[in-house]
Image (tube, rainbow, N blue to C red):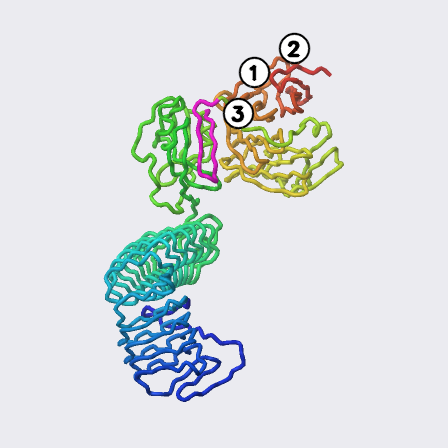
Amino acid sequence: MKNNKLCIFICAVFLSVSILAVPALATNSGDFTVTNGVLTKYTGNEKNLVIPDNIGITSIGDYSFKQNNTLTSVTLPNGLISIGERAFADCEGLKSANIPDTVTSIGNYAFSDCHSLSSVILPDSITAMGDGVFHGTILSKPIIVNSGKILGYVPADYTEYVIPGTVTEIAGEAFGPFSQISSITIPQGVTSIGDGAFCICNWLTSVLIPKSVTQIGAGVFSRDSRLVSVNIPDGIKTIGDYTFTDCCSLASIVLPDSVTSIGEIAFSCCNLTSVSLSKNLISIGSNAFYGNARLMSLIIPKSVISIGEGAFAGQQNMMLYGEEGSYAQQYAKANNITFKSIIIAEPVQYTVTVNAKSESLWAYNIDGGVYFKLRDVALLLNGTDKQFEAFWAADSNQVGLSTGNAYSQVGCELNAPQKLQIDAAQTSTDSLYIDALPAAGSVYTANNNNYMTLSDLAATLKLASSLNKENHTAKLISAPESSAAELTGKVIDNIAPANAGSSHSLSGDGSVILSYSKGAASICAPLKLNTSGIYTKGMEESQTGFYISEAKTAIAYGGDGKAVDVLVSDDMGKTWNTYTVTGSSNMCGTKFISFDTVNNGWLTVNPGVALGTSYNYVFATHDGGKTWTQIGNPNYIYPRVTTGLGFVNNQIGFLCFRYDFADFEPAICWTQDGGLTWEKLRITLPEEFDDYNKTPLSPLFSGANGRFPIQLSKSDGNTSTIYLISSDYGKTWVYQEK
């Protein structure tokens, strides 16, 4: 439909004239001028006009009878197919019209402002009805055509109306402007609402639009001065021009995630104080929110790439929120609007099962991860052997979890977010401690609550967790036997690449050069590390984790102020993909990465070393490095500097640490349950090595056979390497003599 300017300032009319693609042949028959079947002019003065059937008229042309004040009745010819725009508009004396059953379409305002028109015979053949066809007439009953599908007109003196369930389309200006309607029921099944359908309906206070509606036209609710509430159903893609202009009682609006564009002047001069935008919004039209003096702030999703001129004009002290580097930030700077960087949080509902008992929880999608309220999880685990109390220590800015203690409710548990649209989250300024030990993982604050991923909590609480983003389900097992996932993918022989001499090096500009089989194949990876000599967190070669084999190549890097990234290739460096490790923000210290199959891999990260202490966090992937989930860690028994990582399979793995002056044996922790729990591995070496510092490096495996390198060093700086071997998947190790 055309965007008619139906409300005071919406005054421009767009004409749609259908021209048949045939040679022009004019036929003049008496008082009628017919061109190519279109009646374009009538020069007679008949009051009760019957248009002949035999002069070849198939269309009444636009404006052809406009302001004909002689007519009192008109009978249109058989064979007529369409009636053009404003064809009989402003015919003050016209009282009745007879339309034949050959007509299929009636154009915009065809009989508008015929103030005496009280009778119309309409056929059911009409399948298209324009805007305001009978606006300004005195027809006393609603007009519904096309087998009950199109509602074209409701008398202006109706104060309430229940639209029949057969209706699928509400034509433009079917009610407005200046209708006295105050109550309207729109049935499920209506799919579209035309331009200005409820324009200037000043008694209308609320409208419930059914989920079946997928299209609402321009100016639909424009100048509805008493409109307080209206819902926009999911499925609507566009909020058209002028849709809510001058709805001066409208204080809040929520746009579903289906909305991708907001038209010009769509919400101008409302009384908005709260607006929730779609996470998929792409464009905001010019003057879209002009004149909303009480709208002080607005969160702009990162999907927005276009904002029109004056979109937020007329608001003093307006503040826009959005992600750092977003288009919204650029727009705010260019238009002298205050901007504050935030992290976008998208509410999402999950069914979480704890030991076979399910509960519905609200969570947030933040930065690629799903974050749950700590207090919600505490309530779900209450009464299990992994229950914990949660508290906040304001004096030390600590969020504390005390395991084994019953949880005390505070009243906010299991509540839905204050608004179910995108919201602002912040990286928590509070430190997370579990049983007085610092805990890992990203913690975000939203709506004055702290949120973490289930995997981060599970890693420290020794739970087994799983999460399915597609069907919004999650599981926690409070007393699992193992956190190991199923072993999938081709098994990798990790000893062979080492024997073959697969390695890495850096070029002068920091480009990473990978070598396979002692240089038989060499490629340059799409990554540059720091070689400037000026320390750069997370981008030093010593802080980067390398895994190089012909079946899988992976490089873990970064972590300064953001999450760690993993660069992955499955074809010896011909193609690469970069994946982010959710929950690894600010882990810019030393990294180690390993794979035992092409799908199953492990990564250890840490934030760095302080006074010899380093809290290390282990992540696992079971899809080749695309997604990573934190598993358990040995921080509760050995928080030291890592020197290696290696897993035999999905159950048995090893984490290696720098030599310890207080412990003369190699410092190794190992897991036999997929990382759920860890313990110190005791290995006794021959006495001849007693005087050496012993640093274990990453163990390598080929099936049941393993090789564990131990670096020996003394204070003089000299080093050498000895090897331990295993033939039972790393369960026992013996020294391999040269």
- Image coords of residue 528 (percent x, y): 63, 42
Give 188 or 156, whichever is nearer the viewer.
188
Q: Residue 663 carries which label?
A: 1
Q: Which residue lies furthest to the right in this view?
A: 520
- Image coords of residue 376 (percent x, y): 36, 33
Residue plotted at (43% across, 45% down):
344
Q: Looking at the picture, does residue 564 appear above or below residue 310?
A: above
The range drawn in magenta is 462-480
Q: Mark 2 points at which residue?
A: 687
Q: Which residue lies furthest to the top in this view?
A: 687
Q: Looking at the picture, does residue 201 appear above or below residue 534?
A: below
Q: How far apart are marks 2 and 3 (CA)?
A: 32 Å
In this image, 463 relative to 727: left or right?
left
Give 324 or 670, whichever is nearer the viewer.
670
Q: How far apart are marks 1 and 2 (CA)?
A: 14 Å
Pointers 1 and 2 in contact (C-beta within 8 Å): no
Q: Number of marks in the image?
A: 3
Q: Quarter-wise, where is residue 574 in the image?
A: top right
User: Which tag, 2 or 3, sits closer to the chain's start?
Assistant: 3
Identified by mark 1, the residue type is Asp
Q: Name the residue under label 3.
A: 675
Q: Residue 212 carries which label?
A: none
Q: Of circles 2 and 3, which is in front?
A: 3
Q: Residues within 10 Å of mark 2 (few under 14, many from 20)?
A: few
SS assignment at label 1: loop
Identified by mark 3, the residue type is Gly
